[in-house]
Amino acid sequence: MTQSIPSEVLLSSRHRIINRASSVTGIHPRELTRFLKFAIVGAIGMLVDLAVLTFCREVLGFPLALAVGLGFTVAVISNFTWNRLWTFPESRERPLATQLGQFAFINLIGLGLNELIVLGLHPLFSKALVDPPAYLAAKVIAIGVVLFWNYGANRIWTYRGIQ
């Protein structure tokens, strides 16, 4: 029989970790928590992105640039939804269309960065790996880079003023 850990203990441990990270980085605990939530949503988005990319490329035979764009777009819709509901719930008080437009605009720039990185790294990785691992490795690097652009730009514009 397994013994469950009380939720208060888990919550307390999480707060200690966040507070320690905050003291090391100088980032307010609330903002650090938001970034971690944004990153978790992004990790889910990455799975969505990679699944759509792989399906479009391997099953439907789409060109790499189109498959990358479609995967990215579906992931952006998923990420917007979860960020609005969980990461920045206060943002639900703002008009949906305006916020979606801002999020989409920032992510279009992110898509451009994403495409440049994937299409730039894919030929290099193809020298050592076959597809799909070659383009998926390039895609994972692109996602990691674009995460910081998306969070920073959305925090400044889409989610401006949210404490």
Image: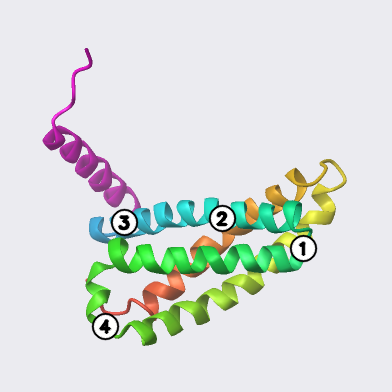
Going from N to C along the chain, the mark reached first, 4 or 3, is 3
The CA distance from mark 3 to mark 1 is 39 Å
Q: Is residue 6 magenta?
A: yes
Query: Is residue 16 in view?
Result: yes
Residue furthest top in the image: 1
The local secondary structure at tag 1 comes to loop
The local secondary structure at tag 4 comes to loop
Q: Is residue 13 above or below residue 57?
A: above
Going from N to C along the chain, the mark reached first, 3 or 1, is 3
Magenta residues?
1-25
Mark 4 lies on residue: 94
Q: Is residue 112 above or below residue 22?
A: below
The residue located at (27%, 41%) in the rendering is 17
Do the residues bearing badges 3 and 1 touch, measured as CB atoms within 8 Å?
A: no
Q: Is residue 101 left or right of residue 92?
A: right
- Work out which quarter of the rendered image holds the C terminus and state it: bottom left
Residue furthest right in the image: 127
The CA distance from mark 1 to mark 4 is 37 Å
The local secondary structure at tag 3 comes to helix
Mark 2 lies on residue: 144
The CA distance from mark 2 to mark 4 is 29 Å
Going from N to C along the chain, the mark reached first, 2 or 4, is 4
